[in-house]
Each structure stands twice: as C-alpha cells, then as structure tokens.
Image (cartoon, rainbow, N blue to C red):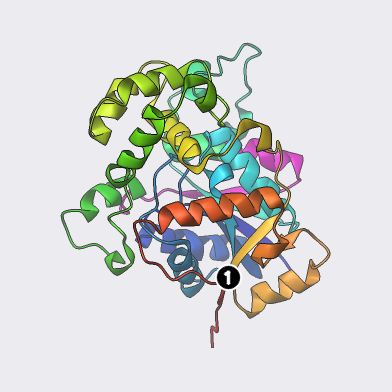
Amino acid sequence: MKTCGIIAEYNPFHKGHIYHIQKSKEITQCDCLIVIVSSFYSQRGLPSFLSRHDKTKLALKYGANLVLELPACFACQSADYFARYAIQSLSVLDIDCLCFGSESNDINTLQSISLKETIDPKKNINQNQKLSLKPNDILGYQYIQHCKAFKIQPISIQREEAFKSATQTRLDAYYTNQDFQEYFHLEQNWNSYYPYLRYFLQMSSPESLAQFHLVNEGIEYRFIQASHHKNWNDFLNACISKTYTKARIQRTCMMILLQIRKEDMPSSFYGCRVLGFDSIGQSLLKEKKEKPIYTRFKDLPLFLQEVERKSKALYTTFSNIEDRMIIYDRY
C-alpha cells in the first residue's frame, strides 16, 4: 500500500485545502492519504476556529483516508519543531512520501539550502540565511530536512494564488460569508482567552512562570509587566520586539495557559493519535497494529493524557463541540 502524508492546520478549512488533498492523491497515486492536523491550537499559537472533530470530518469527506492529531504541545512550536514532531508521528506509519504546498514549487532549490554554521536561534531561516522564502516554503524547507531522517520522499504542489490563505480567511470570516462557515467557532480567539491569561500572569511569580515550556530569556518579566493592559491587543503589542515576535508570544502564552512544563516536554514524539479513518485507513492501521498508535485516551502516554485533558478543558470553556473518533463510511 503506497502512503502519502499531509501536514495541515485547517484553521479554518477552505477550498485550497480540498485542492491540496485531491492534488496530492493525483500526483502521488497513493493508496492511502494520511493527514496529520493540529487540533485545538495552531502552530502560531492561535485557538482554532474549527474543532478537531470537524477538521477530521471535512478531511475525510474530501478524500483523506486517515486523520491523525498533532497535540497542542507539539503543534504550538516554531516551524522547525512543528515539522519535526509531525513527521516523526507520520513516520510511525512508514509513509512513502509527504506532499506540501509551496509558493515557489521549486523543491530542488529548497533541498539545496544548507544552514550556515553560525545560526542565531532568535531569528528565522530568512534572517539567518538572508533569504526571502514565503511561509509555505519556510515550512517546506523544514519538512524536507526532517523527511531525510526517515527516508520519506518530499513532494511539492504549487500554492495557487486563487485560493485565499488561512490567515486571510480568518480575517474575512468576521465580515463576510465564507465556505464552511457553519463550522466556525469565532469565539475561539485570544480576546476570549486573555482574561484568563491576564489573571494567571498577575497571580504568578517570574520564577513560577519560568518553569513552563518556551518561557525563556526573561520573557516572563515582560509578560507580567504587560499584564496591566486590559485587552489582548494592547498586551500583545507591549510584548512584541525584535526578540519576541507575535507568533512566539502567542505560542508561549498558550504553553502557560495549558501549564506545559519544560521538564515534561519530550524531545521526540514517535506515536500516532488517531482522530478518524475510512475503510482504507482502517486497513493501514491494522497493518501497523504493533506500532505506537493511539485510538483511545487511556492508551496515551500519561504526559499526552494531561495535554489532552487541559487542551480540551480550555477549548470547551468557550465552545460546545462534538468530540469523538470518526469512522467514515465512504459508500
């Protein structure tokens, strides 16, 4: 069985994602298409407009055969770690190839980029390498690097400008009718979450905040100082600097809200958290039944049980959602 993986966010799901799913199947001629998706919280540290249940349902409806979850602790990371954790998880199923969208669609150029010996971890790849890669190409570069470790073939698809980006779709969602808007939970945003974060920051010492994952380089002092602001945007703008980007602040704040501690974070994640499948996906799971594949909450490692419990508790504070594994009947 030839298998192809897709790494996705679906925040929110739009027509470009349908194109990605269908084009990946067309190009690779795979027998089984596997999507690994960030669930409650995204790579940029944003609450997701779509629940993981609806992301799974839509992915399966439009052609995926198996949907896996990238838990919040692994999803809310910089591009390098986001790619690393997702591909490590997909590697459990021994996928043959990974298909990703690319603005340049020039996989040879992306493969040829070699990192300089001196790298400033505070800067992204564009700043370190004096490049001008666009967002999908930045992720694509990281995917290619991590695919090498697992002998997975990276394949790129031209990013079609006709399709709005997820960022633009999120902005438009508040003002116009959108495809799949019936699935949107617009209350899932940092304006809703900020009162809880603000209270926690004001009740915490710098030393207690410093125990949480991604809290380093004194950012805890900046957060506490900025927490006198009564709304999210003012807090965020007070924290942004050359060192602390918007995305980094959002990711770090999410780790604080979810209380994910540095000492608990594993350096690797070799496992599959299953969200849904059709008959083809089920056949693949049966083939790989000796692998670390988790279909039930009680089977998850204890750390991931805690992440699941906290993530779901926080998300459902603002949205009443359906949340169950989906067995999709394609016929």
Q: Position of residue 157 (x, y in %)?
A: 50, 51
Q: In the image, 271: left or right of 257?
A: right
Q: Residue at x 57, y 32 (%)?
A: 213
Q: Residue at x 66, y 67 (%)?
A: 296
Determine which residue is flagged by label 1: 276
Question: Within 10 angstroms of label 1, few (less than 14), some, or many (20 or more) residues?
Answer: many
Q: Position of residue 27 (x, y in %)?
A: 57, 60
Q: Residue at x 62, y 34 (%)?
A: 111
Using the rendered view, name the quadrant where residue 228 is placed.
top left
Q: Nearer the viewer, residue 121 or 221?
A: 221
Identify whether 188 is placed above or below 137: below
Q: Is residue 8 visible?
A: no
Identify the residue at the far top of this view. 118
Q: Nearer the viewer, residue 164 or 305?
A: 305
Identify whether 215 is placed above or below 106: above
Identify whether 91 is placed above or below 19: above
Identify the residue at the far front of this view. 203
What quarter of the picture does the N terminus occupy?
Answer: bottom right
Specify the amino acid type for callout 1. Gly
Q: Residue at x 83, y 64 (%)?
A: 290
Number of marks in picture = 1
Q: Position of residue 7 (x, y in %)?
A: 55, 52
Identify the residue at the far right of this view. 290
Q: Position of residue 221 (x, y in %)?
A: 42, 17
In terms of secondary structure, where does tag 1 sit? Answer: strand
Identify the residue at the far left of this view. 175
Q: Magenta stretch containing residue 237, yes or no?
A: no
Q: Magenta stretch containing residue 150, yes or no?
A: yes
The boundaries of the magenta stretch are 142-165
Q: In the image, 48: left or right of 273?
A: left
Q: In the image, 199: left or right of 150?
A: left
Q: Is residue 217 visible?
A: yes
